[in-house]
Amino acid sequence: MRYQYLDARLRQAFDDAKLDRGQRALLQGVLRALDPDAHLGEHVAGLNSAFLAVTRAQTALESHATEDQPRWNLLRRIIATSIACMDAAKPAYAHGGGLELAKARRILVQVDAAIAADGQKLDPQVTAAAAAKLDPRALRKAVRKWVTPLWNGVELPLRARMIAEVAVVVAVHGRDGRQLRADLLRWLKKPGADLGEVLWPQRRRHVVAFVVRGARVLRHLDELLPQARQEPLHRNRLPKDDFLAGAVDGSSVLVRLPVEAADVHTAAQRGRRILNEVLDQYAAGERLTELHIAPVWQVSSPAGRVTRGTEHQRTVNNAYPLTAYWPAELRSAMRVANLARQVDAPMASAGLAWSALEATGLDPSKIAWLAKACALQMLRQHLISLHVVVTNHDTELRGPLDAQVPTTGVKHHLKSVDAWLEVLVGHNRPDDRLRAAQDAVTALAENEGGLVQDLTELWRARLADSKLLADWLREQEDTAAAVLEWLYVTRNLAFHAGRFASPADTLTAHAGQAVVDLTLEFLGNWRTVERLRQDRRGEQQSRQETSAVEIYRRLAQREDQLVARLRRAGSVRRLSVEDISGPDEKWWSRGRQ
């Protein structure tokens, strides 16, 4: 199933361990954030994090001091977005790390003042000194200690913000979500051990084995990777039941190399990255030969346990295109976005993700427009995701909700997001059918408990206070802007400065792909609606498509208008999210006769 953090086995383990709601929410929240299928607003790569903001700022300052990348004006934008993210995350640090966060903020404010005063004449020693003073490790150390108060009980909405920060620190430590879930299931049987040791186990030496296709011997491998070992493979000499039997195709070589990692799956991922970087050498030396790593892998743990696996690839019964016709302006963006998914190197993948956005006409001066557009689309995504998790377990409790909020297909896709929004919003005099649907949501959330109950209460609170929703939209905008600015920096570091590694670059790559997916989603929807409207009017001969940049501008204007309306309206009764990122101006039309 898609949402593994809500599956029956994990629920049963929670019940057997007698975990309370907050404890369930902590474990489920971290697992959800590490789920590769989570959308941008749920995945760890798209969460607001002060720790990640300080890490990025330090990397940018160090790079500017040594390579003049990013340039002074882009560096200032990185500092501004980092400060915005830090300010939003500040309440969580009341449970530890507040002084360290305040110190990091002062350092960034001082650098910003220096840039404002000196501009392009900024002394690299200033940025080098600031980078040396910043200490993301101090924030990481503080966040690790939050497990105890979270386990003992922290109230919403602070609990949600703290869990997000914990999830980021877990991901940066190098934890695979599937492996963490398996470790938590074992821990729940005997929960006396320290939970922190499960979330952040010590990195240990694993030996990873891969099959490289295209050669039988990699000459000088022992010089490039001194601890690596290789063995030529012959398909006809392998036992039929050997796990390598299907991986050997023509000339192949088995390569074993040691990797320091916190778990087996992370070891396999890091080993593949190391070996791919080494293969760059051989690809350059053998320009007519194609070398690539087979999807199978084997990892030997420090205890001698052998784990075998294959690179995970999602499949579907029916694959659908973005649009049912060729949108000329998006063809290059779709091509580059697809390439970004296929690249293993995180820095290159992130750089290609920026190039995909650039192919739509985006440039750094328009990042603010796209960030606002992303905030609107994330509002819609979050509400749809909430319906999915609330109705995750099909029981008799769903009946009144399904009657009010119709769905379609075996996956129960919403026919109307606004019908679902109507149930979540409070009413002074709801009719019997609506009240029954609202009671069903409460019952479903309480039955699920943990994260689902938290999410239901959080969204009901945001929809009960329009100012809270306006603040949430602005935070999503700031977070998206920080991701986009950092994508541009990563692209410059990868393509101009030749950097192939950076702190948390795997998160950057995932965030880049997620932003591109989100952008293509609303651009594709806009194009589809626009084309259908032209077809109805009989305008086939004179089709005109709104440019992507114009869509960014119009959605940015819409987000500003929506936030202003929410701040003064005092209610979200008129809010409509059905076509909130589409060409029609219906975002404040719900409830009109």
Image (spheres, helix red, strand yellow):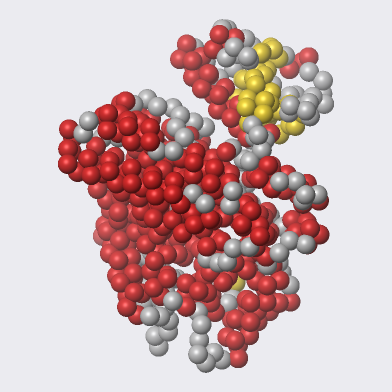
The picture places residue 468, in percent across and down from the top left corner, at: 42, 71
Looking at the picture, how far across and down is residue 49, in whole percent? Answer: 46, 50
Question: Can I make out residue 307 in this image?
Answer: yes
Q: Position of residue 251 (x, y in %)?
A: 64, 15
- Residue occupying the point 63% across, 82% down: 439
Q: Residue at x 68, y 26 (%)?
A: 206
Left/right of residue 477 with respect to residue 449 in the rendered view? left
**As drawn, 550 above or below 333:** below
Nearer to us in this view, 38 or 286: 38
- Against 411, residue 593 (above or below) is below
Relative to the observer, which residue lies in front, 253 or 159?
Answer: 159
Image quarter (top left, top right, bottom left or bottom right) of the N terminus: bottom right
In this view, 400 is above or below 175: below
25 sits to left or right of 521:
right
* Residue at screen point 73% across, 17% down: 235
Q: In the rendered image, which quarter is residue 240 located in?
A: top right
Q: Quadrant of the C terminus?
A: bottom left
